[in-house]
Every structure is written in structure tokens, then in C-alpha cells.
Image (cartoon, grey):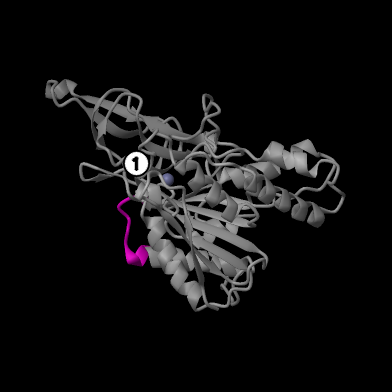
Amino acid sequence: MTRQTERIPLMAPSPGTTRDLVVHRFGAAGARPKAYIQGSLHADELPGGLVAHHLGGLLDKAEVTGEIVLVPAANPIGLDQRVLGHHFGRHFGGTGDNFNRGYPDLTDAVVERVEGRISPDQATNADLIRAAMTAAVADLEPTTELDTLRFTLMRLAADADIVLDLHCDQEAELYIYLGEDLWPDARDLSADLGAVSTLLALDSGGGSFDEAFSLPWWNLKQRFPDMPIPAGCLSTTVELRGSADVYDYLAAQDAAGLFRFLQRRGLVAGDPGPMPDLIAEATPLTGCDMVRAPVGGIVAYRRELGEIVAAGDVIAEIVDQTAAPDQARTPVTTRTAGRLFSRSDNRWARPGQPIAKVAGAEPLPDAGDYLLSD
Ligand SMILES: [Zn+2]
């Protein structure tokens, strides 16, 4: 099966300047199931791009029975943003917009198109909703280069059964953000990737790319409670460890995990073998303690990634290097028990800055509606 490669030009930011989104397609157009996989939407998060490179190599040699759309570099704008020798790929330099926030909620646009046509047949409803999602995205009118990028990515993903947005954290183990209603269906993804944590939320509050494709299905279920509407898109953000974990051996391992998952889901021919044991059950995103520095200073960690900690454990000490040595250290504790799976790579903390994440099983009392660390 040969890959088809397409270059989609984005709106030119200025005369004489253009950027292209490079899209690789495997399998027959319109074949089901369809997976959309993109890497490095935060353009300075490179593990996703390297995994996409390895996965493409595996798919070139495979029999793809569904349709797979692979975008290894989902953010050519951010790839090109350098300031004084540093790469800035998380926010759009023109406006400060986070490249993975502010994706439009398609729910109302889809409801408008399906109202009066939802039936007692689940498969028909799924087809109807997918067509409505596609039509709703096609109607989005970009007025900026950033919007052309956002809407072009959405067009590629709108009717997919599976959307995998490959990101990474700062210093972290491999973990996954997932819609609450997609669990336990997505156990195979977490197991095949060896995720140490799967964090569940219906709506994490930021309009992130993955939720643009999962949340409308959940919302439609609430709008039409008497009709069978499936969780029609397994859309997720995969955090491929830390930003410096860019190695062929890890990327090859992750690509092989994704390949087995695609086999399990009927997109690629061949036997994936038995599903590996899940490393950990999913936990609520509201239970993830975003451990914050109470004061500014130098972060000296006391715990390593992968450690299971108890509530009240000291994760780090913040050192005020200007203070007398016996008064220089402020301990930072976690409020929950669970696995320490993420730390900041910036060792110079400001008050309130998140410096670690601990996956706890119980929702924290003050989690609020905005669940992302940005
Ligand atoms: Zn990211």
C-alpha cells in the first residue's frame, strides 16, 4: 500500500511567504475506520514528530484496511518561530494564543444539522453526526493564518473514528488525556502505549484539539437523551514523555505501540498479539494534583518521576539562594496520593507556578472548571 502525500498551503502571512501542511494518507480514501494522527501541534514538542516518522515507515510496509491520515508536523507556523536562538512553538508569537487552545465547540452547529433526523438506529446516527461535523467544519471561515491552520487540521480530523494528538510534557512519563466517556473503551490505547497514567475529563476547559472531536458526541447525547448516540470519536492527547525524550529507540517503541493499537482497531491487517497489562487504571483529571511553588526560587526536587507518593510528601524544596542557609528552603508537598508522573524542566520557579503533577484517584476539592496547567 503506497502512501499519498499532499501539501496544503496555509494562508500567506505576508506577500512572498507561504507555509504548507504536509499530509500523508494510507489506505483507501473513505475506508473505515478512519484514524487521524498528528504530531507536534505544540511545535517545540518533537517526540510526536519522530514517532510519526517511525509510524509512517511501519505503515508503508503494512496492509492498511481502514484509512489513516498522518500529519507529522501539525504546526508549520510554530516550527518556524525562533527568538534569539530559542525555539518557541507553544504559543503563536503574533498574539500569544496557545496553539492547542481555543478550538471551536461544534456542538450547536452539529445540532442544527441533525435536529429532527436523529433516529433509534445508532449506526445511522453516527453517520449523520459525522457528516454534520464535516459540514460544520467546512463552514468555518478563517480570517487569520492561525485560523487557517486550526481549521485545516479540523477538516482532516472531523469525521475520524480515532484522533490521536501527539504531544509531550516537560519532564514526564508517557501519559494520556482522554474524555471520561471514552473509558474503558480506550484501555487498549493506554495498554499498547504503556501509559503510566490516563487522565479523564469530559471538558478540561481550554478548547483543546482533541476535545473538539470528542466533546460534541457527549453533548449530543445530552441533547437527545432518548436516542442512541455513541461516543463516536476516540479522540485523545498523548503525552510522549518529556521534551528532551527524543530518541529513535523510544519513538520506534511508541510507533510499534500505536501500530498494534491500529491493528486491534481494525485499521491495519495482522495480529497485534495479546493486549499488554494496563500499568494503571484511569484516574480523574480533577484528582491530578498540580503541585505549585508557593514562593519563587530554585527548585530542588526530592522525588523522581515514577515514584508513588503519599499526601503530604515533600516533592521539592524551593531554595532562596540569597537567604541564610538554614532559612533558605521552603518545602512543597503534594495534596494527594499517587504517581509522580510529571515535573517542570524550568528549575527557576515563580510563586504559583506548577512544578509537578501527581495522579490521584480522588477528585481534589478545588479543582475548578479549568483543568490544564497551560
Ligand atoms: Zn503540547
Q: Which residues are magenta?
A: 242-250
Q: Give 219 or 140, whichever is nearer the viewer.
A: 140
Would residue 120 be counted in the magenta stretch?
no
Q: Which secondary structure lies at badge 1?
A: strand
In the displayed structure, 296 sits above or below 215; it is above
Residue 149 appears at what percent x and percent y?
48, 47
Kind of residue at badge 1? Arg
> Label 1, on which residue?
343
88 sits left or right of 4 in the view: left
Residue 221 appears at what percent x and percent y?
75, 41
Q: Give 233 or 136, whichever is nearer the viewer.
A: 136
126 sits left or right of 172 in the view: right
Residue 275 at least partly seen: no
- The residue that appears at 58% across and 43% down in the rendered structure is 211
Would residue 247 be counted in the magenta stretch?
yes
Q: Looking at the rendering, in which quadrant would you find the N terminus?
A: bottom right
- The residue that appears at 38% across and 44% down in the rendered structure is 14
- The residue that appears at 74% across and 49% down in the rendered structure is 129
274 sits left or right of 171 in the view: right
Q: Give 291 or 304, whichever is nearer the viewer.
A: 291
In the displayed structure, 142 sits above or below 163; it is above
Residue 362 appears at what percent x and percent y?
55, 35
